[in-house]
């Protein structure tokens, strides 16, 4: 079985390279649907299973896809006639495929997209996406596990989102690029990935203003064309390595990380006694022997990101004292904590908050990832545990981390990924350990 085996106790040191952001590239891939002439050339595209899934969706829609993994370049050509139906086979694999809905509707006047599967971290409804598209004049039907939307010509409107949903903001923003008139989205999501998408849309000829603030204005145009763009760095991958450095009392430079995108995390790390230095070439994180407890509450950007919550919980569990961790974005994102019980973690969950009691004397154990960031958090716990930790269910990790094991290994971790069944005979000196 494919698993990661990590032997805790090594201090991480050195420099790590960060990939382009998964959460930026997926909607940008979907945006290529809008380019009826020319090609969309993307650089800094991460090699992740989610990127492959989105490419499969696009190919099914008759978009020509060329992904050069050696150079991280992706070329998308949607200039031929495209299909407007995204089937269950792909959408069920990845919730983010929902963001093809807005561009398909705008380009084809019709979109039929399978309802996304329920994700473990929460129920994740799509009501805000649909309300927004209806406000732009779409008729929406739901039948046989599909959402179908029709609109001969979308019409601009003023849309207020009850919650600053990332996916809903992206879907509405993309649909509105080809609507008649000026659309405003109020209480819009403000994540850096929204800004990256708006930058791409504007390079494609759209007129999107205010991305990154709570009000986005989109003046509709008649068509969009190809463009060239380099995907923004992944702040969540960068943040995960910042926590890895902090938790191991290490000294790591996260190359090309953008400190402004990780302000809430960096501020929390400093509160916990970790040194964080913004440098020309990235962010340097230097750990501390005594980690201070701190409370964390997840919020939409610019609040503390829910996608960093499982990782920061490991640092909180290592802190000297009690820390409160509150999850306000997803209703079921503490699954990693129950796995961590096997490793000696001491905590109590009350509703949306967890009381984490540190410092934890983590013991290595066999644990299974339940979702993407849980997978990363379990590996982080393994880095500081006594003995060997084995993490399985790595398909989740591969959704969002490229070469996680290799990067940690090059920073000095005793870590190995492979198809190992008999761990009794396994030794960390296995020559294969650096081949990931
Ligand atoms: C591919 C991608 O970019 N994924 C990110 C995106 O997911 P995603 O776009 O799915 O997240 P949203 O911001 O939409 O969801 C946030 C909350 O709003 C709720 N909601 C959302 C839409 C809706 O129509 N109705 C509704 O109730 C969700 O159930 C959730 O509780 O933002 C999340 C919040 O930062 C991140 O954790 C994900 O990594
Ligand atoms: C929850 C995440 O992604 P997705 O929305 O694609 O499930 C994530 O990146 O942590």
Image (cartoon, rainbow, N blue to C red):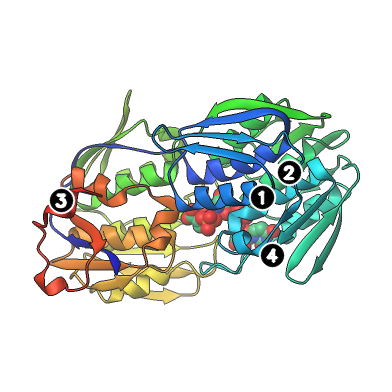
- Confirm or reject: label 1 Cβ below 8 Å from ligand 1: yes
What residue did someone put label 2 on? 103
What residue did someone put label 1 on? 99
Of tags 1 and 3, the one toward the viewer is: 1
Looking at the image, residue 141 sits to the left or right of residue 209; the answer is right
Q: Is residue 350 above or below residue 298?
A: below
What residue did someone put label 4 on? 115
Q: Is residue 219 above or below residue 389?
A: above
Quick one: 312 or 18, which is closer to the camera?
18
Residue 362: where, in percent of width, then height?
20, 68
Res. 190 image quadrant: top right
Looking at the image, residue 81 sits to the left or right of residue 305; the answer is right
| Residue 90 at least partly seen | yes
Per the image, label 2 sits on a secondary structure element best described as helix
Q: Which residue extends farthest right?
A: 152
In whole angstroms, how far apart are the C-alphas of marks 2 and 3?
A: 50 Å
Of mark 3 and mark 4, the one earlier in the sequence is 4
């Amino acid at each position: 079985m494919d698993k990661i085996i990590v032997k805790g106790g090594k201090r991480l040191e050195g420099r790590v390279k960060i990939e382009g952001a998964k959460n930026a590239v997926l909607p940008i891939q979907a945006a290529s649907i809008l380019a009826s002439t020319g090609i969309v050339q993307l650089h800094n595209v991460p090699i992740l299973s989610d990127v492959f899934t989105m490419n499969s969706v696009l190919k099914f829609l008759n978009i020509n896809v060329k992904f050069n993994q050696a150079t991280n370049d992706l070329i998308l050509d949607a200039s031929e006639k495209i299909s407007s139906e995204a089937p269950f086979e792909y959408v069920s694999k990845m919730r983010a495929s929902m963001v093809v809905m807005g561009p398909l509707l705008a380009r084809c006047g019709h979109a039929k997209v399978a309802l996304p599967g329920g994700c473990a971290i929460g129920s994740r409804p799509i009501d805000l996406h649909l309300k927004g598209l209806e406000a732009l004049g779409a008729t929406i039907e739901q039948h046989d596990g599909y959402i179908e939307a029709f609109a001969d010509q979308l019409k601009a409107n003023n849309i207020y989102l009850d919650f600053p949903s990332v996916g809903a903001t992206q879907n509405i923003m993309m649909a509105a690029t080809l609507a008649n008139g000026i659309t405003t989205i109020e209480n819009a999501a403000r994540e850096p990935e929204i800004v990256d998408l708006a930058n791409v849309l504007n390079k494609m000829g759209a007129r999107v203003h205010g991305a990154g603030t709570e009000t986005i204005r989109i003046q509709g145009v008649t068509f969009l064309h190809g463009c060239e763009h380099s995907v923004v760095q992944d702040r969540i991958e960068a943040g995960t390595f910042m926590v890895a450095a902090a938790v191991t009392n290490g000294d790591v430079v996260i190359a090309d990380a953008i400190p402004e995108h990780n302000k809430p995390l960096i501020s929390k790390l400093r509160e916990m006694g970790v040194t964080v230095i913004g440098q020309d070439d990235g962010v340097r994180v230097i750990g501390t022997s005594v980690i201070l407890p701190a409370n964390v509450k997840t919020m939409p950007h610019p609040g503390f990101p829910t996608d960093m919550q499982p990782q920061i919980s490991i640092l909180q569990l290592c802190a000297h004292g009690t820390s409160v961790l509150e999850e306000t974005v997803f209703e079921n994102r503490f699954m990693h904590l129950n796995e961590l019980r096997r490793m000696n973690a001491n905590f109590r969950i009350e509703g949306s908050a967890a009381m984490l009691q540190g410092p934890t004397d983590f013991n290595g154990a066999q644990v299974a990832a339940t979702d993407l960031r849980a997978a990363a958090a379990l590996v982080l716990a393994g880095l500081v545990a006594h003995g060997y930790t084995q993490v399985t269910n790595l398909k989740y990790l591969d959704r969002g981390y490229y070469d996680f094991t290799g990067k940690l290994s090059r920073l000095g971790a005793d870590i190995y990924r492979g198809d190992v069944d008999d761990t009794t005979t396994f030794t960390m000196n296995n020559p294969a350990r650096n081949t990931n």
